[in-house]
Amino acid sequence: MCDGRIVAADTRARVESRKDARQAEKIDVGGRVILPGFVDSHTHLVHAASRAEEYELKIQGVSYEEIAKKGGGILNSVRRLRVATSDALKRRALGALQEFASYGTTTVEAKSGYGLDVASELKILQLHRELNRAQPLEIVSTFMGAHVVPAEYRVSPDGAERYVELLTEQLLPEVVNEGLAEFCDAFCDRGAFTRSQSKRILSEGKQHGLAPRVHAEQLSRTGAAQLAVELEAASCDHLEHINSTDIRRLAKSRTVATLLPGCDFHLGWKKYAPARKLIDAGAIVGLATDYNPGTCPTVSMPIILSLACTQLRMTPAEAIAAATINAAFALRRDDRIGSLEAGKQADLAVFAVEHFREIPYYFGMNRCWMTMKRGEIIHMQD
Ligand SMILES: [Zn+2]
């Protein structure tokens, strides 16, 4: 590699026989397995605190939606974020990013959506930019003002509509003017936004140059996956409740079906997304953590791979492709990251295993030995 890019990726003999290899510094990985760095294409990176206080309630069987109705859930995170200082939010996110790197992740998508008012949403998006500069991982910023309708808009019957208006007429133009996001996301589901509200927000975002992504069919089937295809979204995520027509449409599209099995696992749900059907139909399947305080408090892509293999019945090779090159495609960066090829960024993760299948096989154990971003070592196991 040179200047943070891969010059050649080949057998040792072929690489060593190159002229430019003579001056190169050698790093001996001791027979360990080298992968492209993981691309985590779905996270809610910036949040003020954990929601561990809801954990026992969930275990007792109180549903995610019931907790949300009582002012818990996302609105709980919103209250905390609004009063948190940027410094405190930044410290927490920086700590998480170091942990992401320690599990082999080199690129992290990050969504706003715990602010839900103009100042707080901008505070999160500005942090994405600062975090991108303050540490080695690449942060891909997504505007997700359409996470849920904030409490102050729930008191009147037309509150949701008025909030959509605030998003499309006030917030979106400001986000775009300041260049604070690449993507626009909406949670299109029961208890969040309807299909037509989501369409309005995402279409408006698209007109402003923000490519759409959708939280789709997680709690119920709303037609959000087909909306994603219709809008040529970069990705639609969750998909526990998709049907066979949705699968066929996704398979014919370039919209990545991003699966988040960590959520189902953490919430104790038995219904996982139909990964096999999606793959067999020809859809592009991605995997991500959905790192967030409410439904998936982990930064570990290896454990997501374990869940993908045992619960979604993906093979280790399919799961690794889903968390690297397919995820890079979902972030429209497949020309630059997601695989080990000459010309691409030298984003690598080295695992202390004998075969790549051992990465998901050892679950809950961190076998990541070294992580490299643009040719720089950013994590090394002690
Ligand atoms: Zn999410």
Image (cartoon, rainbow, N blue to C red):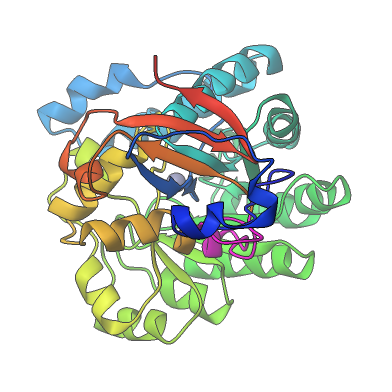
x, y percentage for residue 174? 84, 47
Note whether residue 100 is visible: yes
Note whether residue 65 is visible: no
x, y percentage for residue 307? 21, 47
* Residue at (30% x, 16% y) in the render: 53
x, y percentage for residue 246? 34, 79
Question: Position of 97 compared to 271: left or right?
Answer: right
**Is the residue 44 above or below the residue 260 in the image?**
above
Residue 336 location, quadrant: bottom right
Query: What residue span does the magenta drawing correspond to?
Result: 328-344
Question: Position of 283 compared to 89: left or right?
Answer: left
Residue 329 is a magenta residue = yes
* Residue at (45% x, 24% y) in the render: 99
Question: Position of 32 compared to 146: left or right?
Answer: left
Residue 276 location, quadrant: bottom left
Residue 153 location, quadrant: top right
Seen as rendered, the residue at the extreme right is 177
Marker count (numbered): 0
**Is the residue 282 above or below the residue 204 in the image?**
below
Judging depth in this view, the residue of 139 and 111 nearest the camera is 139
Judging depth in this view, the residue of 153 and 348 nearest the camera is 348
Judging depth in this view, the residue of 206 and 65 nearest the camera is 206
Assign the C terminus to one quadrant of the image.
top left
